[in-house]
Image: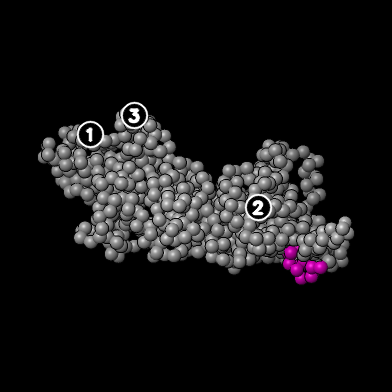
Amino acid sequence: MYFCRLLVKAKVMAQKRKYTLDNTNKETLKNWYFLMTLGRQLDEKAPNYLKQALGWSYHAPYAGHDGIQLAIGQIFDKETDFLFPYYRDMLTAISSGLTAEEVILNGISKASDIASGGRHMSNHFAKPEWNIHNVSSATGNHTLHAAGVARSIKLYESKGVAISSQGESSTSEGYVFEAINGASKEKLPVLFVFQDNQYGISVPQRDQSANRRAAENYKGIKNLKIMYCDGKNVFDSLNTMHLAKEYAQTNSCPVIVHANCVRIHSHSNSDAHELYRDENERRCVRLSDPLERFKVQLIHSKKFTEEEILALDKEAKKQISAAHKKALVAPDPSPESIHDFVIPEPFASEKYPEGTHDGSKGESLRLIQALNQTLKAEFRHNPDTYIFGQDMANKDKGGIFNVSKGMQQEFGPSRVFNAPIAEDFILGTANGMSRFDKKIRVVVEGAEFADYFWPAMEQLVDSSHDFWRSNGQFAPNVTVRLASGGYIGGGLYHSQTIEGALTTFPGLRVVYPCFADDAAGLLRTSMRSEGMTIFLEPKALYNDPVAETVVPDDFEVPFGKARTRKEGKDISVFTYGNTVPMCLTAAEQLEKETGASIEVIDLRSLLPLDTEAVLESVKKTNRAVVVHEDKVFAGFGGELVATIAAEAFQHLDAPVKRIGSTFTPVGFNRILEKAILPDTDSIVTGIKEVLEF
């Protein structure tokens, strides 16, 4: 029996040893060594660009990670796989196919840098056309994107895998756990590679976690395979990565590959490791140099002579020299280009270019009905549309407010499904899903209430500049639905409104409809557009008759088009969301009391904003009031007032007044809520003050 066990063990080890020095042909070994010496020479040359003021102002040397990085690139298939390298992955990028010129163009931030055109930090290597993705500087956040694209790989029955690479210290981030937990729950074909050099800048691993090896923090998670390898050893790394990829593909399960590495140099060119590593430690890691060890192996095995190795070193140097000369004369980014690729062009409505209709066609719907019917209509229109979030798919329940009710029954659990209570995971994997194919559209309930969306802000910030950062090569095609606002007695985390923060990010669209027809039209446009839209829904109006309107079946509302809900000539009231009906009621009341003619403009779209409509109305009435549910101080209305003051000051007959909530959280007790939020009475009082000025 013991002998049989030995035979089985030997067979497994033989399968693991797909590559050995003896059974690997010389041409393959030659290619590996050339990639390694090319990468190392670039790694050592990079700091010189900074010293000569040519660029590469951020460089994180990879020396000591050579084995695992060569292996990642060698198992990567650009036709089927998706690769998310981190900032230390220079050899990974080269092993995956990037040329010396492409690496240098990235390093010195030229316009022809294939990763970002000089927009992103140096050492953030990418080639989107090959599915090598441009990742954030927020270490490890791309684990969520890898899990998301792996979801699409599985849904579309592709044979590829997603590969996420990172250092061990970033595994302390919460969103890394969310990615691995979610990938294991969904059984997704994704490889999480931990390149463990035992340091996070100057912070040793012992200060990161109780376990010496970061992967051990993830033990016990079902459907997750953990493999270990010597990341300094070419053959061990290659064999482990091949085995990991085969396992992930065969079992449709995530795999962590924990590679033990050393960091030979400082963390980056802005770090001095002499300040926290003694000479003995630095000498030991130099003696562990993977490139030198591989070179010795090749020569001692007599597969290569020293002259052949030297010739490969010289050829790499020659290629780098030629690439250097080309890169230096490559064009720099132009200052005018900063406005390119901030956000993709949206879907353009041909039927309703102004986002209005005469009310003669369609069904009268409540706000919640309009949202539900539009979601279903768009799911029928585009079979590559998905929706997920918290509390989304439990029997007859469709989200906390039932906006998506009946969708899983019609479209199935592969298109309508629950997510863990992890907002970063929801948004990050939505971003990743859309990377698989541009035709995919994802709708997420970003949180059950808008107030709970804050954990996803890291992913929102990253997603907001994906299109700009990649020089127009990738935009997350995601609509983020958020039930927003108060007037429900919800209190903290259930009654706040957050558009004042969201509208500060270029690269997002932020819409806040009030009436059923606008909600349907903006949702349709959001789901048909490229790029990310934050879709804020005034939850207090979901079933309120005041928001009910006739909704044409095919209604579309363009972004950046305000809607005049009531014509007037004496004063302009600009509003959106929950306060629109209040403003209309206040206007009617004041017209009866004073005879004043009050214009009410429903902004609908905050980002982009219909500045033209705002200014035209002010020029007509010469007075303006801005009303919103958010706090007056630092609320979105401040931007409106600043725009009016800068571009229509000469037309004003009175100061512009803002009406909103007090500078406090929204309280739970209805008495407190009423004292905090604006209402019809406070709006009437505010408009009167401006009329009487």
Element type at marker 1?
A: helix
Q: Is residue 459 left or right of residue 176?
A: left
| C-alpha gap between disc 2 and disc 3 | 49 Å
> Which x, y percent locates residue 230?
76, 53
| C-alpha gap between disc 1 and disc 2 | 59 Å
Q: Is the stretch drawn in magenta largely helix, strand or loop? A: helix
Q: Does residue 661 sit above or below 468 in this rendering?
A: above
> Which x, y percent locates residue 444?
45, 52
Element type at marker 3?
A: helix
Q: Amino acid at mark 2?
A: Leu
Mark closer to the chain start, 2 or 3 = 2
Quadrant in which the N terminus is drawn: bottom right
User: Residue at position x 59%, y 49% from top?
Assistant: 181
CB under 8 Å between callouts 2 and 3? no
Q: Amino acid at mark 1?
A: Asp
* Residue 148 makes an appearance in the image: yes
Examine the structure image and report whether residue 405 is included in the region drawn in magenta: no
Which of the two residues, 151 or 175, is positioned nearer the viewer here?
151
Mark closer to the chain start, 1 or 3 = 3
Q: Amino acid at mark 3?
A: Leu
Q: Nearer the viewer, mark 1 or mark 3?
A: 3
The stretch in magenta equals 23-34
| Quadrant hosting residue 156 | bottom right
Question: Which residue is the site of mark 3?
Answer: 672
Question: Which residue is the site of mark 2?
Answer: 224
CB under 8 Å between callouts 1 and 2? no
Q: Nearer the viewer, mark 1 or mark 2?
A: 2
Question: Which residue is the site of mark 1?
Answer: 681
